[in-house]
């Protein structure tokens, strides 16, 4: 049997000790880390995946309460909001992700919450009240995680209700920008060791950090509430069930998407842009068109508060059929209703009439998932097989450009898209440890067969006018899209135990993402034809080892990934927001990941992680059909030069941290200082593109925990924290609006990350 691989039941209690707690060393030996990346509980050192895991204490010390907070914490991973939309999150791993978020296209990184796949990026910036751990799986996971895991997968796991005892937790978090977060939690056993219920509630508010001197709300405010109810039942000795209901309300306002200045190639037509604030800098450029992060701006359109409502149900059931056989069922339903404002350059207007783009989107999206798993173990084999079913229904209405405080478009605009998708898959993975080879060799074969049905309807009827009352030339259409896809994805891994503490592995993995169409399409042929699936084959070798009597942990992975039919969004209409997807023949990504942890002393621990990516496309240019009112059929061929590197794929990224722990008379003192570095990256793949400049962000925490209040009265934790301590100005989104050449100018558009933030957390817990 594979060394270090134990049965899930025996290891379940170890999950609360997951990961090396940030700043919590009790001995000069690194603790074993347990994850569920391959659907069973295993030591992270035994899983042949490049994986990073955070336990509850590490998440608290790093200030991670939603998925966006993971940004820059894991090399070769990019997590950020879709430009101009505060609650829509884009995930990229190893340069693979969803560049243009639409309900008609799937994500490229699979996001899971308590085992349930989340099919839409809309509303994924939700708070989580009681996180137990987060696992980030880098590299394609096509066998166990399915068709939309070409980049990798992220598992968010919350703590289940515990029949073992009463637990009460209350925390308050205050900080600059009038930040306030309160989390209240109570876990009550209904019958000891049999059943329990847990209730958790989080409310969070933070003021905007860019004042709007114009119309509507300020930029970048956050207002969120989350409630979860959890019921756990141990049904005899062999079965258990856990039901969770979650409700989230997100009422954020969009970050400021500001003009960074005009491209010199834009010519005299740049004068068409009128800024509400007439002030200019020493170069004669309006202050609201600057590369510096603004603290105030004047919006032309009315800036509105978003409203995202999420209701989610999850039922997990496990039955230990026999000593070496376990059956699992994971059922999920999720309903999202969202109003969001995607406002690009709200501080400018075209000829003083209406803003460049101000999307007011109403989105409804509901999904149902059902997964069955059967897991088995023997002396030489461990295996998992399963069936997966998924369906969703989505609708989105985009009210388009507004011309005043009431959000009324110039003319009557209809922009409606609906989707209906189904997916069915069968998967399996088996690991064989042949005793004839001394139990040091492990061979893993995996495969997944997927069938996908994708349907969409688009109503693009419109009566809208451009400058001077001239019709914009966009043809109206109502059309259906209906395509089926199927794919077989194999995977093979071989790993060898060098000794009891180190192993090496080599693997070949395939994955695919289904085809689809574009909800922003402005022409009938492109919408009906859609785009093809994209395929990815990954080759990876890795090393995992605990060295120096388990005081040093070194994990490394080298990989090469080959893309086929890469899905890329291109502007096919009269402005950058009117887009279709095309397939690019080939792309490749080479890179490495290195994770090092060192227990320097009993009290001091250092961690360092590094990621490298070298990516590029096979062709230099792509061609596609774009809107052309003067051409036969209203379409003509366009071409676009491709960048040297893929979007959001930094060549270098790294994190480093020092953790110090010392017992005091009143409790345990912990100090953490951390840094995240990222090199300059493209924000798109078509020339010309915008760039996110290199950045280095510093953070730190100081805490005293385990402050005893007396026997039976619980304990306190006090934590001081700070993020971006040097107040660095950095982009999380940057677009060069090349498509505006049709209007006579081009402009750079940027969205900045948070300024310096800091605060105090006070936490009480009774166990």
Image (tube, rainbow, N blue to C red):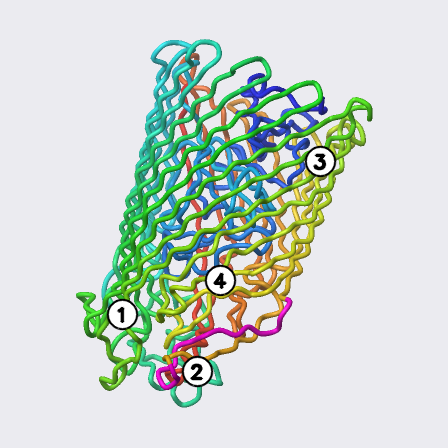
Say which residue appears at 28% left-offset and 44% top-offset: 309
The numbered mark, 3 or 2, whose residue comes first in the sequence reads 2
Q: Tell me if mark 4 has few (under 14), some (14-19) or many (20+) residues whose alpha carbon lies within 10 angstroms of its own.
A: some
Whether residue 193 is visible, yes or no, is yes
Disc 1 to disc 3, C-alpha distance: 54 Å
Location of mark 4 (residue): 731
Question: Mark 4 or mark 1, which is nearer to you?
Answer: 1
Disc 2 to disc 4, C-alpha distance: 24 Å
Q: Circle 2 — which element? A: loop
Tell me whether the residue at label 1 lies in contact with that at label 2, contact meaning CB atoms closer than 8 angstroms. Answer: no
Location of mark 3 (residue): 553
Q: Tell me if mark 3 has few (under 14), some (14-19) or many (20+) residues whose alpha carbon lies within 10 angstroms of its own.
A: many
Residue 623 drawn in magenta: yes
Which range of residues does the magenta coloring cover? 618-632
Say which residue appears at 39% left-offset and 48% top-offset: 120
Disc 3 to disc 2, C-alpha distance: 54 Å
The numbered mark, 4 or 1, whose residue comes first in the sequence reads 1
Identify the disc placed on residue 282: 2
Identify the disc placed on residue 401: 1
Say which residue appears at 48% left-offset and 12% top-offset: 238
Disc 4 to disc 1, C-alpha distance: 25 Å
Identify the disc placed on residue 79: none
Q: Tell me if mark 2 has few (under 14), some (14-19) or many (20+) residues whose alpha carbon lies within 10 angstroms of its own.
A: few
The numbered mark, 1 or 2, whose residue comes first in the sequence reads 2
- In this view, the residue farthest toward the bottom is 268
């Amino acid at each position: 049997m594979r060394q270090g691989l134990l049965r899930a039941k025996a290891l379940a209690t170890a999950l609360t000790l997951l990961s090396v707690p940030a700043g919590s060393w009790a001995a000069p030996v690194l603790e074993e880390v347990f994850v569920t990346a391959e659907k069973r509980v295993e030591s992270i050192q035994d899983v042949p995946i490049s994986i990073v895991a955070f336990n509850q204490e590490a998440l608290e010390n790093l200030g991670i309460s939603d998925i966006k907070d993971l940004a820059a914490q894991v090399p070769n991973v990019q997590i950020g909001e879709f430009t101009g939309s505060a609650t829509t999150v884009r995930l990229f791993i190893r340069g693979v992700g969803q560049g243009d978020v639409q309900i008609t296209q799937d994500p490229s990184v699979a996001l899971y919450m308590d085992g349930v796949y989340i099919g839409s990026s809309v509303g994924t910036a939700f708070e989580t009240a009681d996180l137990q751990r987060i696992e980030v799986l880098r590299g394609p996971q096509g066998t166990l995680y399915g068709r939309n895991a070409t980049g990798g997968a992220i598992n968010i796991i919350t703590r289940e209700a515990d029949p073992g005892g009463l637990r009460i937790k209350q925390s308050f978090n205050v900080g600059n920008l009038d930040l306030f977060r309160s989390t209240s939690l109570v876990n009550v056993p209904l019958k000891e060791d049999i059943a329990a219920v847990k209730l958790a509630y989080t409310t969070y508010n933070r003021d905007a950090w860019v004042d709007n001197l114009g119309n509507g709300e300020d930029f970048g405010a956050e207002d969120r509430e989350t409630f979860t109810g959890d019921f756990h039942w141990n049904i005899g000795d062999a079965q258990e069930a856990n039901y969770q209901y979650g409700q989230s309300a997100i009422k954020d306002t969009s970050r400021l998407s500001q003009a960074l200045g005009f491209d010199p190639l834009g010519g005299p037509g740049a004068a068409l842009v009128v800024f509400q604030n007439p002030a200019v800098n020493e170069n004669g450029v309006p202050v609201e068109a600057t590369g510096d992060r603004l603290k105030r701006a004047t919006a032309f359109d009315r800036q509105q508060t978003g409203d995202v409502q999420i209701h989610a149900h999850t039922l997990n059931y496990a039955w230990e059929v026999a000593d070496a056989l376990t059956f699992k069922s994971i059922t999920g339903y999720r309903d999202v209703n969202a109003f969001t404002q995607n406002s690009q350059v709200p501080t400018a207007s075209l000829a003083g009439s209406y803003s460049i783009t101000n999307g007011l989107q109403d989105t409804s999206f509901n999904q149902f998932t059902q997964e069955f798993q059967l897991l088995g173990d023997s002396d030489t084999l461990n295996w998992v097989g399963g069936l997966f079913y998924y369906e969703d229904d989505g609708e989105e209405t985009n009210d388009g450009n507004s011309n005043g405080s009431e959000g009324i478009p110039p003319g009557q605009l209809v922009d409606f898209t609906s989707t209906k998708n189904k997916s069915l898959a069968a998967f399996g993975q088996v690991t064989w440890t042949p005793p004839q080879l001394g139990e040091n060799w492990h061979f893993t074969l995996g495969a997944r067969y997927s069938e996908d049905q994708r349907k969409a309807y688009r109503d693009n009827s419109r009566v809208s006018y451009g400058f001077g009352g001239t019709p914009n030339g966009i043809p109206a259409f109502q059309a259906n899209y209906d395509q089926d896809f199927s794919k077989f994805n194999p995977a093979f891994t071989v790993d060898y135990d060098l000794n009891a503490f180190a192993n090496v592995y080599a693997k070949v993995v395939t994955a695919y993402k289904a085809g689809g169409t574009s909800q922003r399409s402005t022409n009938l042929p492109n919408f009906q034809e859609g785009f093809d699936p994209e395929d990815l084959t990954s080759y990876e070798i890795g090393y995992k080892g605990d060295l120096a009597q388990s005081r040093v942990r070194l994990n490394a992975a080298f990989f090469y990934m080959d893309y086929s039919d890469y899905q890329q969004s291109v502007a096919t209409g009269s402005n950058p927001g009117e887009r279709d997807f095309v397939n690019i023949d080939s792309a490749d990504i080479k890179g490495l990941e290195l994770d090092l942890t060192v227990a320097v002393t009993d009290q001091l621990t250092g961690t360092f992680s590094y990621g490298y990516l070298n990516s590029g496309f096979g062709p230099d240019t792509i061609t596609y059909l774009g809107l052309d009112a003067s051409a036969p059929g209203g379409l003509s061929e366009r071409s676009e030069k491709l960048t040297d590197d893929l979007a959001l794929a930094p060549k270098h990224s790294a994190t480093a941290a020092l953790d110090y722990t010392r017992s005091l008379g009143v409790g345990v003192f912990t100090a953490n200082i951390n840094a995240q570095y990222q090199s300059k990256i493209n924000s798109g793949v078509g020339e010309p593109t915008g760039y996110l400049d290199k950045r280095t962000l510093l953070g730190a925490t100081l805490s005293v925990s385990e402050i005893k209040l007396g026997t039976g009265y619980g304990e306190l934790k006090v934590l001081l924290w700070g993020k971006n301590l040097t107040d660095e100005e950095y982009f999380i989104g940057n677009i060069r609006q090349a498509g505006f050449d049709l209007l006579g100018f081009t402009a750079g558009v940027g969205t900045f990350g948070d300024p310096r933030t800091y605060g105090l957390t006070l936490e009480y817990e009774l166990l």
